[in-house]
Image (cartoon, grey):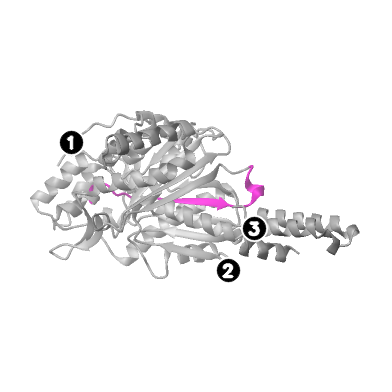
Amino acid sequence: MQNLTTALISHHPNSVQLIFTAILHHHYLIPSPFLLPVLLLFIFSLLAVAISRRPRPIYLINFSCFKPENQYKVTRETFMKQFKSKGTFTDESVGFQRRMLERSGIGQETYLPESLLGTPINMCAAAARKEAAMVVFGAVDELMAVTGVRAKDIAVVVVNCSVYNPTPTMASMVVNRYKLRGNVKSYNLAGMGCSAGVIAIDLAKRLLQVHSDSYALVISTENMTLNPYFGNDRSMLVSNSLFRMGASAVLLSNRRSDRRRSKYQLLHSVRTHTGSSPRSYSCISLQEDSSDHLGVSLSKDLMSVAATALRTNISALGPLILPFSEQLRFLLAFLCFRVLLQSKKQSTYVPNFRKAVKHFCIHAGGRAVLDQLEKSMGLSEWHMEPSRMTLYRFGNTSSSSLWYELAYCEAKGRIKEGDKVWQIAFGSGFKCNSAVWKAMRTVEGCGEVGRKGNPWVGEIDQFPVVVPKEVAVVA
């Protein structure tokens, strides 16, 4: 009976109405004593189909961010000394990188791997794998210790790292290290830039809709060993001053029994890809310069491309989270601009997302990006604090930076039950991706003791700090 009901619903939109009409108008075909049981069976079958098609809630049980040992700390001066020691930069390139670093908003305690701190700099495959193992396993070890989840219970593994793509993959490294079960679904995302962390969450969400009663492990990182550029093309030198070492690990679940112990529930994930535009597609690209030095080139169009992608993403996410009053204001502004003023330009009205979201975790891509987003979205210093402090303390850790920012909010004791958190990230292609979470419970601040996996433990009381517009880097 249930199979018949499912088939009818799938192939005929008016099947329910037809069945009821047939039963009510031709009930003489069914002996009256059996009419009620048949109706009840049909109703229960219909309910079973409807329930089975409901999307499963996705819970975030916990997450961790890797915090390297003090031996990997690097000051701005040490950074300049190490990169200059390579001997490939011209005086103009050294001066340009120094000026970029002085205005970057990055502090004196970020981290670089051993391969870039030694003499000579060692950019080889073995060093890259050693760094990847340290940051990824460090984050996962802390997550497993905090959650108590057994490795054999993990059904899905998604790892994202843009530049470093070894064979076997990083996902296979995780499977091998933790002896995950043979039928684990593993995925390795590469070349997707700093927004890949949200893409990985979205992929895990979709997989958990298929695999019931399962856990998904999502790991985000970038490899610094193979990331630096040692040529003299200014469009490629910018990334040197921003990127630093880090990683995050997130445990998701679709088990309803995990609702009580989970921190967050994933409400929405919205992905925007503007790669059909040649201008957007080429604004961030990995390529060789005229001297065959490999690096990531950043176009001058990056900021305007990012603004366009953000508007597109907001237009898709807005109706999902904004209150009706804000949606109505946006619609009226749009109609006024297009109809009354007969302009084809975008309306200048930006919805007030602070009415829908309490906390904003904006990818710490750089000071200029954060300044522009603060202005365009009408956010306060309090809203931007997690992103600015993450950039200052840890630098741009690529796709994992969103989780360092959320960890900052938790360490400060800001997350209260029912609060909504909006993670926004940008990446090559060009992509703008969003994830909106709802806090399932109040998260206590970590202070000086705190919990494992939070990189702000022991120092959160020192923040926020005032970050000058420019800080001199002593030669």
Is 183 rendered above or below residue 234? below
Number of the label disc, if any, that sits on residue 14: 3
Name the N-terminal-most of marks 3 and 2.
3
Asked if the magenta segment contains residue 39, the reply would be no
Task: Tell me where the magenta segment starts and ends, as one range.
Answer: 240-260
Viewer-nearest residue: 82 or 143: 143
Q: Are marks 2 and 1 in contact (CB under 8 Å)?
A: no
**Viewport quadrant of the N terminus:** bottom right
| Of marks 2 and 1, the one in the foreground | 2
Mark linked to residue 472: 1
Say which element carries label 3. loop
Contact (Cβ within 8 Å) of mark 1 with mark 3: no
Instruction: Determine whether the residue tagged by mark 1 lies in a helix, strand or loop.
Output: loop
* Quadrant for the C terminus in the image: top left
Relative to 442, say whether 310 is above or below.
below
The kind of residue on which mark 2 rests is: Asn
Q: Position of residue 383 (x, y in %)?
A: 39, 32
Q: Amino acid at mark 1?
A: Ala
Q: Residues within 10 Å of mark 1 (few under 14, many from 20)?
A: few
Q: CA distance from mark 2 to mark 1?
A: 54 Å
- What's the distance in space between the residues labelled 3 and 2, CA to CA? 40 Å
Label 2 sits on residue: 183
Q: Neighbour class for label 3 at 10 Å: few (<14), some, many (≥20)?
A: few
In the image, taking residue 146 as reference, residue 44 lies left or right, namely right
Which residue is rendered at x = 45% and y = 46% of the image? 435
Please report the residue visible at 53 percent of the width from the left and 51 percent of the height from the top: 251
* Horizontal arrangement in the rendering, residue 103 relative to residue 327 (left or right): left
Which one is closest to the eye, mark 1 or mark 3? 3
The nearer-to-camera label among 3 and 2 is 3
* Residue positioned 45% across, 55% down in the render: 200
Q: Earlier in the sequence, mark 1 or mark 3?
A: 3
